[in-house]
């Protein structure tokens, strides 16, 4: 049996399937890292919600942006033409549940703009709580989608009983 040697490392060359899987796993690692950063921001926002609601709102909004950014980055990998840079507009273009998420965020984006315009303003407490709950649920849904896109034998490794 003849083995093809990789010119770069002197080891066996990877098959196209192995290269494709390696690329998918590298992208998953990046997506998971971005998702983890979003969860860290959400956690910081949750901890500050009572004492620094303005800062909390900003952190939660950044978590939402980062989570949505994972979905947009994944979609752009499959598209010939990249989605818009505005993540909420990009989510709208993805359609389905992503477009619904973008639509639900409209009052939260407006609230953030209001806070940006008035440095002494405090976020509406109900909107802050809504943002916390919705962003948390959305980040969980993104994590499920990441695992769902893996080959079955690899997705099983990520499941918790």
Image: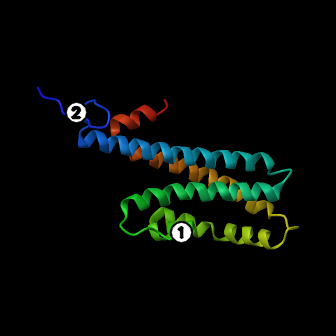
Query: Under tag 2, what secondary structure?
Result: loop
- Sequence-first tag of 1 and 2: 2
Work out whether 23 lies above or below 55: above
Residue named by callout 2: 5
Work out whether 27 lies above or below 89: above
Between 57 and 82, the one nearer to me in the picture: 82
Residue furthest right in the image: 120
The image quarter containing residue 3 is: top left
- Residue in the image at 49% along x and 60% along y: 72
Q: Is residue 95 visible?
A: no
Residue named by callout 1: 85
- Residue in the image at 57% along x and 50% along y: 139
- Residue in the image at 75% along x and 58% along y: 57
Q: Is residue 16 visible?
A: yes
Near mark 1 (Cα within 10 A), the count class, few <14, some 14-19 or many ≥20, is few
Residue 153 lies, in percent from the top left, at 34, 34
Residue 155 lies, in percent from the top left, at 40, 38
Q: Can you tell which of label 1 and label 2 is closer to the viewer?
A: 2
Residue 19 lies, in percent from the top left, at 30, 42
The image quarter containing residue 78 is: bottom left
> Would you say the residues marked 1 and 2 are in contact, meaning their CB atoms lie under 8 Å apart?
no
Disc 1 and disc 2: Cα gap in Å?
Answer: 42 Å
Specify whether 122 is left or right of 65. right
- Total labels: the figure holds 2
Specify whether 103 is left or right of 157. right
Query: Under tag 1, what secondary structure?
Result: loop
Mark number for residue 160? none
Residue 147 lies, in percent from the top left, at 44, 43
Near mark 2 (Cα within 10 A), the count class, few <14, some 14-19 or many ≥20, is few
The quarter of the image holding the N terminus is: top left
């Amino acid at each position: 049996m003849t083995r093809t040697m990789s010119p770069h490392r002197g080891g066996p060359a990877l098959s196209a399937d192995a290269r494709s899987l390696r690329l998918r796993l590298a992208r998953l690692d990046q997506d998971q890292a971005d998702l983890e950063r979003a969860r860290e921001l959400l956690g910081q926002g949750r901890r500050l919600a009572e004492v620094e609601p303005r800062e909390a709102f900003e952190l939660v909004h950044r978590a939402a942006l980062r989570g949505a950014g994972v979905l947009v980055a994944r979609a752009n990998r499959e598209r010939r033409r990249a989605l818009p840079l505005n993540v909420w507009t990009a989510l709208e273009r993805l359609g389905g549940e992503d477009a619904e998420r973008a639509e639900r965020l409209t009052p939260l984006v407006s609230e953030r703009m209001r806070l940006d315009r008035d440095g002494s303003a405090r976020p509406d407490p109900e909107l802050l709580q809504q943002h916390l709950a919705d962003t948390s649920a959305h980040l969980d849904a993104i994590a499920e989608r990441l695992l769902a896109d893996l080959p079955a034998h690899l997705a099983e490794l990520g499941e918790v009983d």
